[in-house]
């Protein structure tokens, strides 16, 4: 009787460990990129404000994407566009929700510093460089200065064979702009 209980406990512990490991494996993992590397990889780097958002299934009805239209307030690299459409995985469509760890969908009115490239789908949208890394949320202080950060919960960083929480690269907006301009030359 005692050995049966020990087996049940061992089996439950093994199941719990397997669930924990598989849940940890579901996080989005990135190889950290510097602002300079993201600038080089991006065709467009802009400061922008989210003005609209919608989610829809792909043609195969296997993935949901969120499409956010941003009003461009400053171009740091790339084409001079007044608006830019960004496609990101995840969202809610047709009564279903798909969540992608670490992906931040902008709320209407939210400001961001975005490192973008054209979507491989050729649909006129742009995607964020470095998975989630090229999406810096902008936080304005009362004095008008701004900070940007691309750190987000649910994302992990792989550096030197070690996986850790992706804390991002918080910095002053002016510092980010200067680094981008130097790298975009």
Image: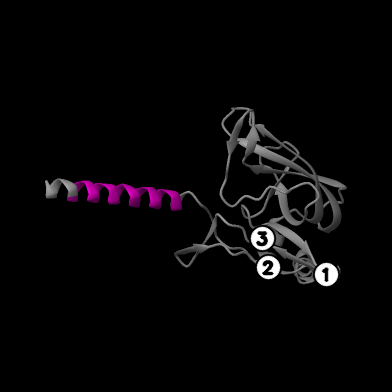
Q: Which residue is mark 3?
A: 150
Q: Residue 165: x percent and y percent?
A: 53, 62
Q: Residues within 10 Å of mark 3 (few under 14, many from 20)?
A: many
Q: Which residue is mark 2?
A: 170
* 11 and 50: which is toward the camera: 11
Question: Reading the chain from its start, which is encountered first: label 2 or label 1?
Answer: 1
Q: Is residue 78 magenta?
A: no
* 77 and 91: which is toward the camera: 91
With respect to residue 70, does 30 lie above or below? below
Of the two numbered discs 3 and 1 in the rendering, the one whose residue sits closer to the viewer:
1
Which residue is painted at 58% across and 43% down in the image? 99
Q: Residues within 10 Å of mark 2 (few under 14, many from 20)?
A: some
Question: How far, Cα to Cα, is label 3 from label 2?
Answer: 7 Å
Which residue is painted at 62% across and 50% down in the image? 103
Question: How far, Cα to Cα, is label 3 from label 1?
Answer: 17 Å
Q: Which residue is mark 1?
A: 145
Residue 39 figure quarter = bottom right
Q: Is residue 107 left or right of residue 83?
A: left
Q: Residue 20: x percent and y percent?
A: 39, 52
With respect to residue 74, does 85 lie above or below? above
Question: Reading the chain from its start, which is encountered first: label 3 or label 2?
Answer: 3
Prevailing secondary structure of the magenta residues: helix
Q: Which residues are magenta?
A: 6-24
Q: Are marks 3 and 2 in contact (CB under 8 Å)?
A: no
Element assignment for label 3 = loop
């Amino acid at each position: 009787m005692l050995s049966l209980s020990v087996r049940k406990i061992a089996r439950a512990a093994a199941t719990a460990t397997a669930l924990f490991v598989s849940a940890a494996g579901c996080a989005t993992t990135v190889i950290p990129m510097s602002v300079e590397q993201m600038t080089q990889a991006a065709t467009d780097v802009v400061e922008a404000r989210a003005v609209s958002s919608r989610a829809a299934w792909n043609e195969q009805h296997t993935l949901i994407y969120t499409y956010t239209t941003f009003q461009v307030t400053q171009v740091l690299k790339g084409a001079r566009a007044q608006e830019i459409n960004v496609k990101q995985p995840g969202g809610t469509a047709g009564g279903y929700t798909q969540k992608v760890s670490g992906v931040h969908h902008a709320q209407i009115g939210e400001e961001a510093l975005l490192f973008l490239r054209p979507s491989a789908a050729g649909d006129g949208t742009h995607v964020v460089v470095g998975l989630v890394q090229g999406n810096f949320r902008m936080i304005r202080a009362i004095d008008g200065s701004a900070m940007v950060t691309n750190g987000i919960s649910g994302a992990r960083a792989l550096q030197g064979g070690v996986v850790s929480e992706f804390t991002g690269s918080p910095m002053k907006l002016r510092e980010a702009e200067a680094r981008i301009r130097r790298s975009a030359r």
